[in-house]
Image (cartoon, rainbow, N blue to C red):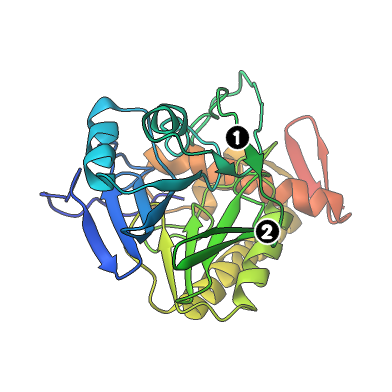
Amino acid sequence: MAHMSLPPQPWPTGDLDQLEPLVARVLAPNASPYTYTGTQTYLVGTDEGLAVIDPGPAEPAHLDALTRAIGERPVVAIMCTHTHRDHSPAAAPLAQVTGAPIIGCAALHIRSDAPRVDAPFDQDYAPDRTLTDGEHVQGPGFTLTAIATPGHTSNHLCYALEETGALFTGDHVMGWSTSVVVPPDGDMADYLASLDRLYAREDRIYFPAHGPAVEKPKQLVRGMAGHRRARERQIVKLLGEEARSIAALVPVMYKGVSEKLWPAAGQSVHAHLIDLERRGLATRSGDIWAIA
């Protein structure tokens, strides 16, 4: 959940920032309390060929910046970690410009009238090829392997750069914030299982879609999983005192957190409650939840 103020400007929006020999970044102009300084599009590869990870929003300025950053280099794949609208809409126009195929997460068509606290889904995303867990995309000097990490969304993939030990984590793990898990597509049990899966890996560094690189991945993932499990214990304790609605739980659980962020907190509490209900640990009657 978003919880930090934005860093002071200027941000490197639109610049090509070479992070490592095989990894460069272009920051999209879509900063917000939920995207931090904006969506980070990664260019992975060499002068002989690139993959573009999370092309971002279809903002003309961002597409221009990406086209400049790519230059004359061939693009072998345009790859999305998931299909929230701050990640995938630029895939189609970038494919038109570069001729590259869109390869990566599955399309996901969810329509809901419920108020959302995260970005709505991109209904127009249409991949040329969907990757399943463990499948690869190869280019000159690089191999990207899909790691299925459902939870934030059901179609979320991370991408492991096999040559260097870098992992592109999309919105699953970010250095600046915990990930929002919004039912019905977001799933807390899946999210925690995906965190456990990443914790078991030996990645050297994470490059998230928002916020700074994560240089101590295991430490951060352990902390995130611990934070979620502590929230679950807090819910069980509060419901043990008395049955409550989500609206009654949030002010107690998120004392000291800006009320602007309470809707997002409520969505995560809801995700925890659904998980507890599935495990037979909580029940609901209307909008009132109780210990089973």
Name the quadrant containing residue 43.
bottom left
Task: Note whether residue 37 is visible.
Answer: no
Question: Whole-percent x and y of residue 182?
Answer: 60, 40
- When asked about the image quadrant of residue 103, the answer is top right
94 w.r.t. 283: above or below = above
Query: Relative to residue 163, is residue 105 depicted above or below?
Result: above
- Answer whether labels 2 and 1 touch (C-beta < 8 Å): no
Q: Horizontal and vertical percent for residue 224?
A: 53, 67
Report the front residue among 80 and 43.
43
Residue occupying the far left of the picture: 10
Residue lying farthest top? 113
Q: How many labels does the image show?
A: 2
Is the residue marked by circle 1 packed among few (<14), some (14-19), or many (20+) residues within 10 Å?
some
Q: Nearer the viewer, residue 108 or 2?
A: 108
User: Please, what is the three-letter code of the amino acid marked with disc 1?
Assistant: Pro
Question: Could you tell whether 242 is left or right of 164 in the image?
Answer: right
Image location (x, y in percent) of residue 155? 66, 44
Does residue 99 show up? yes
Looking at this view, is 261 or 86 the one in front?
Answer: 86
Residue at image mark 2: 135
Question: Residue at image x 18%, y 49%?
Answer: 15
- Residue kind at label 2, given as amino acid type: Glu
Query: Is 129 situated left or right of 204 in this image?
Result: right
Q: Which residue, given by chain and number where applicable, does mark 1 sit on?
A: 127
Residue drawn at point x = 37 percent, y = 53 percent: 42
- Find residue 213 and report its image quarter: bottom left
- The CA distance from mark 2 to mark 1 is 15 Å
The numbered dot on residue 196 is none
Q: Crowding near pointer 2: few (<14 within 10 Å), some, many (20+)?
A: some
Q: Which of marks 2 and 1 is nearer the N terminus?
A: 1
Question: Which residue is located at x 33 percent, y 57 percent?
Answer: 211
